[in-house]
Image: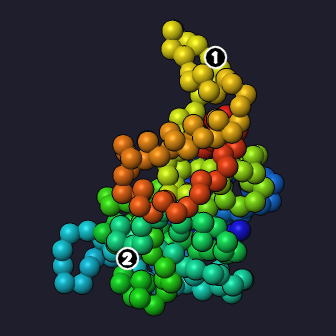
Amino acid sequence: MRVDVLSAVPALLKSPFEHSIMGRAQARGLLEVHVHDLRDWSDDSRHRQIDDYAYGGGAGMVLQIGPVYRAIEALRSERKYDEVVYLSPDGQLLDQALANRMSLKGNLILLCGHYKGVDERIRTELVTMEISIGDYVLSGGELAAAVLVDALGRLIPGVLNDETSALSDSFQDGLVAPPVYTRPAEFMGWGIPDVLLSGDHPKIEAWRLEQARKRTAERRPELLNQSDEVPRAKPGPQGDATAPST
């Protein structure tokens, strides 16, 4: 998968894509992430301006259509893209099902909004898809783009060390993940469930399913109706975590 990110503040995206799982995915050639500065396509070579006041007045600056159009056209002249995605608070809400579908794409352009928003013609004429990571507003779309790339990148075959780990993530089957434990088995008098030390894998899987349903009922009950007819994927040995954090 190749992802090209168009941003007014590209420095915000330097760290998220260079470390941990996303960094390793790129090092292995499984994922390409290219961050582009929209100011490189500005009409104003001196000040590199890419925003202007909104017609009709009002607070805040608006991202201009010219730099965005030229950036997208420059990228499209080099390859075909499956989607041009605008990260927007009123876009389609990102969930695991959407991440699964998007992870099958080959090439994506992600446009990060900034300032008060973007010229509406960008959304109607250039963007093919809009995605939101939640019902709240950020200073720009850069953090949302990082979240989206991470959600998609970890689903690419070979990115995660444990091939089954992505299948057992929260929400893959409509349930949140069950509790997980690691060494030591006792700490400060706090133990772990005996079943996890039993070596009886069918019992362990049954316990995990029971705990996943219990936790979902307590924390995200609206998900239960969606998961009633979906068998839980067999968890990998590390549940949601696929490797120690780096």
Residue reaching furthest bottom?
125
Check the image and report above or below for 224 versus 120. above
**Crowd around label 1: few <14 · some 14–19 · many ≥20 (10 Å):** few
Helix or strand or loop: what does disc 1 sit on?
Answer: loop
Q: Which quadrant of the structure image shows residue 74?
A: bottom right
Q: Name the residue at 42% across, 83% down.
A: 123
First in sequence: mark 1 or mark 2? 2
Check the image and report above or below for 175 versus 236. below
Q: Name the residue at 51% across, 14% down.
A: 190
Q: Name the residue at 57% across, 37% down.
A: 207
Q: Which quadrant of the structure image shows residue 51?
A: bottom left
**Which of the labelled discs sits on residue 63, or is there none?**
none
Q: Which quadrant of the structure image shows residue 214?
A: top left
Q: Amino acid at mark 1?
A: Pro
143 vs 169, left or right, is left
**Which of the labelled discs sits on residue 184, or is there none?**
1
Q: Name the residue at 80% across, 59% down.
A: 29
Residue reaching furthest right?
28
Helix or strand or loop: what does disc 2 sit on?
Answer: loop
**Which of the labelled discs sits on residue 118, or is there none?**
2
- Residue 92 appearing in the image: yes
Can you say which quadrant of the picture contains the C terminus? Answer: top right
Q: Position of residue 150 (x, y in %)?
A: 59, 55
Viewer-nearest residue: 191 or 241: 191
Q: Position of residue 121 (x, y in %)?
A: 39, 88
